Image (cartoon, rainbow, N blue to C red):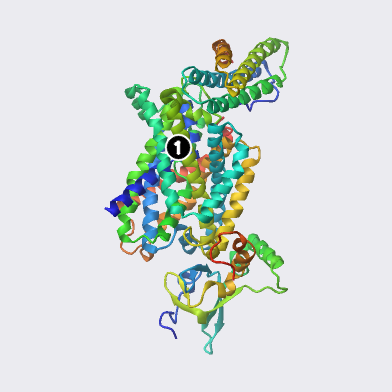
Amino acid sequence: MKKLLEVFLGVLTAIGGFVDIGELVANTEAGARYGLALIWPVLLGLVVVLLYAEMAGRIATLSERPVFDLVRERLGERAALINLIGSVAVNFLTMTAEIAGVALSIQLATDVSYFLWIPLVAFGVWMIIWKVKFSILENVFGILGLTLFAFAVAVWQMHPDWHSLFSQATHPTVPHGEGHPTYLYWAIAVFGGTIMPYELFFFSSGAVEERWTRKDLFINRANVYLGFPLGAAAAISIMTAAALVLKPANIQVNHLDQAALPVGLALGKVGLAVVLVGFFAATFGASLETALSNGYVISQFFGWSWGKLVSPREAPLFHAVMLVTIILAAGLGLSTIDPIKITEYSIVFSAVALPLTYVPVLIIANDPNYMGDKTNSRMTNALGMISLVVVVVAATAAIPLMIATKAGA
Amino acid sequence: MAGCAGSARTATDYRLKARNSAKAALSAVETSTLAARLVRERRAFSTYVSVVLDSAERDVTAVESTFSSIQPPGKSSDQLRSALGNVLNDAADTISSMRIASRRDARHDLLAAADKLPKLQSDLQHYSDLPA
Amino acid sequence: MNADVPDVIDVGLRFLDRQIIDCNDREVAKVDDLEAAFDGEGRPYVIAIMCGPGAWAPRLGGRPGRWILAIWRRLHPAVEPEPARIPMNVVAKIDSAVRLSVPRTSTAAATLDRWVDHHVIGRIPGAGNEHV
């Protein structure tokens, strides 16, 4: 019974934790611009993240070591250092976007400028990492994130023509007057927003720290295979709501507030309030995860003591890294750079950085020295290789497309 | 997006820039129309509506100032410049009034200002369909 | 010789870049480099593990390696800085990690760790056990 509850909680947390500022921004923009013609990158991203999150969880359980620790041992110092720099840079950008996203969500409820909230949010993030047993809060934020299903309820309330939606999604076409490069750029943005590298670092480090055993592999699979698809469903409902309301009105999405318009129109004040809670929870949870991820990867590269469950004095460098990066992220958030732009860059650079994480995961998941008899099956390897090709193509195309399309303008 | 400043070398180039400005402003006007609908149907709280209108206002003012700073390539473009300039100016004024009313919780004033939106919408639609 | 520490080891495969863990299961550092000596028959043997930028920067090589090494030398309090050493006699076991028989804070590899704890982290309220 307790096991069942644990699985249930884990699944709920995985659903809520799947969506963050990347999806809120990219899926709204994509839905408003392309209707449902960019559902496929969400689904593609889902398949890729399912495969690799399962591998990362399995690696962490069997080797009792997190991904980044093994990256250095397996790839050597130089390759791991390049990997570290890329991953931390993307993580940092993502963390800035998430913190700004929390501040923007509070602004929507209070009409007080997000600039004022950023320092408070940054302090709150640090405080929680410093003091609170994060595993409890992880569940709290994950479950509050479920309120984003208000988007699905809103879509259902609008009584859309399901048949036409389905054919839009299955027969994607580039709208008249839009160039193909821009469409592909947005496809990469949606793909990158669906799978961000920090998720794997966070996930595998948590598994090591909570000392998962072979028996927990079942929980790992349940979390991943049930939680992520439902999370992706929430992400798709955000896009669908935008496609139904914002696209017919020719609205170009430049602000987070526009993402909630469809919910207000369909469900009224209560729905709007619920969805704003969802914005807050999703971005706050992701702020914590990205902050911790930076602490994890840097500490694991240098071999420093790390862990969200040990006291700060037991892991001073780990905490120092997080303190410094949170302060810097708040600083960048307070510069006048548009937080939506920061989000767009963070998801596109996420796509660029993905091979850095995914290549070593695939290598290690096939190494019997770490995995014993639980190395990848042939099927997993075949799917893993195909996914890796997709990831590498997206990563290679991202920056040229960004330049050619002036970042999707 | 509003990022289309600079000079226009030909009349065609200028028309293209006008078209993009009109599209961006249309987006802000449409966003404000949805915000007005939320207010009319009492489907949102005023803090949220104020933020939406504030963002829309910032967008439309940015478009307006960008467009007015483009050097028209010749006399033939001056007419377009002043006509679209007027519409953009009206759009910015209207959304500003709505934002002010929203922050004062003056529902009636907000809806009165919003009555100008349909006209702005059709004007901007006209300019965003300009042949290149 | 300790049975848990093998007599012969493939340094590249089994030793370098491994995690070092102390007697309380806490991470200490990585095996950034090794110090070797030669026995009477000319066979190399490991006498110490070296940690920190002073050890890994030279291994990194190239310009980045030289730069990091130079910065490390400049910032290091000693005139002729040496990389932190962990003598092999405190190594209890080598498996998937290098396990020490002493606590993390007693090793030279934890200098930065101790400094940050003493001057920053330990001074913030709620950092854990009181300052000693």
Q: Nearer the viewer, residue A229 or A33?
A: A229
**Residue A110, located in which quarter of the rendered image?**
top right
**What count of labels does the image hold?**
1
Q: Is residue A135 left or right of residue A115?
A: left
Vertical side of A23 occupied by B42: above or below: above
Quick check: can you spot residue A36? Answer: no
Above or below — where is A220 with respect to C27?
above
> Residue C58: x and y, percent?
62, 67
- The x, y position of residue B102, in whole percent, is 58, 22
Q: Residue beneath label 1, please?
A: A278
Chain under disc 1 = A
Residue A164 in sight from this viewpoint: yes
Residue A18 position within the rendered picture, expressed as x and y whole percent measured from the top left: 42, 43
Say whether residue A216 is left or right of residue A179: left
The structure residue drawn at horizontal position 44% and vertical position 33%, both measured from the top left corner, is A274
- Crowding at label 1, few (<14), some or many (≥20) Cα neighbours within 10 Å? many
Residue extending farthest bottom: C40
Q: Secondary structure at mark 1?
A: helix
| Residue located at (56% from left, 75% from top) | C106
Residue pictured at 57% horizontal, 63% vertical: A316
Q: In front: B132, or A135?
A: A135
Where is A371 relative to C51, above or below?
A: above
On-image quarter of the C terminus of chain A: top right
Q: Where residue B67 appears, x then y in whole percent?
A: 67, 20
